[in-house]
Amino acid sequence: MVDVRTWDWEPGERAVADVGAWDDRFEWVEELHASPDGESVAAVVNKGDAQFSVCVNGEPWEGDYDRAWFLRYSPDGRLTALVSESAEWTLCVDGQAWENTFGYAWGTRFSEDGAVIACAVQQDGRYGWCVDDAPWDTLFEAATDFTLSRDGSAAAAAVQVVTFGQADIYTFQAGGYTAAVNGRAWDERFVNIFHLDISADGAHVAAEARTSLYDYTIVVDGKAWNKSYPCVWKPLFHPGNGSVVAPVRTAGKWTMATELGPIWPLFAQCWHALYSPDGARLAAIVAPAFGRWTMAVDGQPWATTFSTLVTDAVFGPGGERLACLGKNDAVWKVAVDDRVWPGSYDMAWKPVFSADGAHVAAKVERGGRQTVAVDGRELPQSFAQCWEPAFSPDGRHVLVRGVEDGAFLRRVVPVTDFRERG
């Protein structure tokens, strides 16, 4: 994890950059991106005549490119961009390009601490990963569902290993897909492979697998479960013991299952499973009845339900608390521990817990203005744009990053400054 103790947690506000002035210096300025610690703000900029660069706190990178896109800060604060020069793509990290170039690159990913940086690549019509400027030794005819382990030690993807034409249904049904881990494909073949998960230690990979036109199961390190189902969703490794669970469809409904079979009651839908950090609790987004959505923990659904969707569920650090977003028609809500915050929003973003689990914060939007709410209470000020909040190590302060009147602002706010909306 990133050590937020090194960040500046002195309460107050600083203007970091005059981003409004960038419009006068460049042909156009693309989406702004804020560093995790709020000390810098960046955007892809066009300097004219198809010359692109990245501007950070008002200073462009030295290099100019035919195109730059997918600007992302790593968790440890490094700034990355995918760039093209002379029709060759690569990744730039803080303005320094990787040595390897490709026909195309996309989907930058980071390890949990930001130490490992990877992206998906295509070269000469073949696909795979490039991790810290080291491309896979073997690239494949097709690759999807790119997944990087939390520690960055394993990069996996669903890959095509058998060539067949668009109308060659017999070869397709015989199985031409599998998973590749760090460039090495499993020996087993499947009709399709989807949605991979990697164990916490990076040693094992699980995936949804289609074994025939009508049968689905879970595959772990190439070995399929003994049971098959009409459909399955993404598997999930236990963070401690490495066992695997997955949502499966059975008897016309959905439940959670292990390799031995179902372990939860049946729901109209069950997916997007997650474990608490210690693995003691298992949660998933479920529909207790058709058209009603909620969270279930260890098979028990919340009393609170939503009509449109539930998303962005997250456990608190201790595993005792659970938060998510819910939507009724066009109205977004934040729910924590089966209780809904009073605010109604046009949009809301994934909740964030303090390190001790005592507080929950979320970026929210109403009427075209964005702000941060903590424990259901909103910051009195709003912004033209802001980013997801972060808590100080002791949970007493919140880092708010926002843009107002053309200035990128870094504000450290005591939790006590958040107020009930009048």
Image (spheres, grey):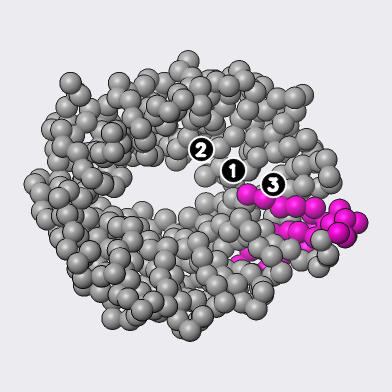
Binning the other alpha carbons within 10 Å of mark 3 as few (below 14), some (14 to 19) or many (20 upward) gives many
Q: Earlier in the sequence, mark 1 or mark 3?
A: 3
Give the image location of residue 278, x and y in percent. Answer: 46, 39
- Which residue is drawn at the image coordinates 58% and 53% (left, top)? 198
Give the image location of residue 331, x and y in percent. Answer: 40, 27
Q: Amino acid at mark 3?
A: Glu
User: What numbered label is drawn on residue 236?
Assistant: 1
User: What numbered label is drawn on residue 303?
Assistant: none
Q: Amino acid at mark 2?
A: Tyr
Asked whether disc 2 touches disc 1, contact meaning CB atoms under 8 Å apart, the reply is yes
- Which residue is drawn at the image coordinates 29% and 33% (left, top)? 366
Residue 300 as seen in the image, left or right of residue 361: right
Decide which of 33, 181 is in the foreground and name it: 33
C-alpha span from label 1 to label 3: 10 Å
Residue 343 as seen in the image, left or right of residue 246: left
**What is the secondary structure assignment of the residue under circle 1?**
strand
- Which residue is drawn at the image coordinates 91% and 56% (left, top)? 170
- List the residue tagged with mark 2: 275
- Seen in the picture, residue 217 relative to 139 is either above or below; the reply is above
**What is the secondary structure assignment of the residue under circle 3?**
strand
Q: Quadrant of the N terminus?
A: bottom left
**What is the secondary structure assignment of the residue under circle 2?**
strand
C-alpha span from label 2 to label 3: 18 Å
Residue 399 as seen in the image, left or right of residue 244: left
Give the image location of residue 116, x and y in percent. Answer: 44, 66
Q: Earlier in the sequence, mark 2 or mark 1?
A: 1
Binning the other alpha carbons within 10 Å of mark 1 as few (below 14), some (14 to 19) or many (20 upward) gives many
Binning the other alpha carbons within 10 Å of mark 2 as few (below 14), some (14 to 19) or many (20 upward) gives many
Q: Tell me which segment is drawn in magenta.
A: 167-195
Q: Residue furthest right?
A: 170
